[in-house]
Image (cartoon, rainbow, N blue to C red):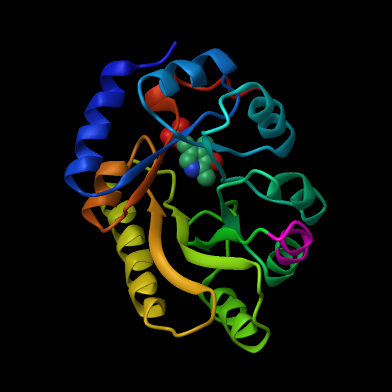
Amino acid sequence: MINAEDYYNIHKITQEHKATIVAVSKTKPIEDIQALYNLGQRDFGENYVQELLTKQQQLPKDIRWHFIGHLQSNKVKQLVRFIHLIQSVDSFKLLQEINKQAQKINKPIKCLLQVYIAKEETKFGMNENELAELIQSIQQNPLSHVHIIGFMGMASFTTDKNQVRKEFQQLKKIFDQYKSYQIKNYNLQILSMGMSSDYTIAIEKGSNSIRIGSLLFGERNTSKS
Ligand SMILES: *Cc1c(COP(=O)(O)O)cnc(C)c1O
């Protein structure tokens, strides 16, 4: 079951702010994705490679698939054929592997760099030093088949709205700072931040791409994955 009314409400908000919705469908069945597709949604996000491959085969081919989970280098090869955007790049090594696989099929792959902004230790992504190092690496070793088009981040999982606001503001600041860099195949346009619980704050702080799961598809069963 999907929440069509919430979908229309969120859609309206994003339209007013020139932002886009990525519907996060991890753990959710094909039928729910198809139902949201039938309402016009085309951007979907998944966290697990195998699950994404299975769904991609069965669903309409004009879906734009976003990979938003932790990506292991040995899984990259399976994704590049069809992926629209890899949002969760967190190392230069991973970027090199994406470049290598993308080169093989002669298809440039769009990527976001995942930046760590939360207080918690468990969230994936690079801290500001690691981000600076990665950007230095691409300046020194240009990659022909990856295009860096923005940043992605997740705020702390907390009810403290001020904390969340501070973290999104911090990511926006970093984004603006790195926007001016002149690097080949690097053009920051997408700031992906905001989930079901905090997307209005994210938009207020400058997000132009929100990733919404449970609000659209209902709560996930957390016992698996
Ligand atoms: C699961 C997930 C989401 C969606 O979370 P909801 O709270 O269900 O909206 C967004 N981004 C990432 C990276 C996720 O893993």
Residue 73 place in picture, x, y as percent: 78, 56
| Quarter of the view holding residue 69 | top right
Residue found at the very far front of the displayed protein: 106
Label tally: 0
Percent from the top left, x then y, of residue 217?
44, 21
Secondary structure mostly taken by the magenta-highlighted segment of the chain: helix
Residue shown at the point (20%, 48%) measured from the top left: 17
Quadrant including the N terminus: top left
Left or right: 210, with 81 as reference point: left
Q: Nearer the viewer, residue 55 or 123?
A: 55
Q: Residue furthest bottom?
A: 140
Pick the front one: 40 or 206:
40
Please state, as top left, top right, bottom left or bottom right, where the C terminus lies in the image: top right
Span colored in magenta: 99-106
> In the displayed structure, does residue 48 sit left or right of residue 33?
right
Where is residue 135? Give x, y as percent: 56, 79
Q: Is residue 27 magenta?
A: no
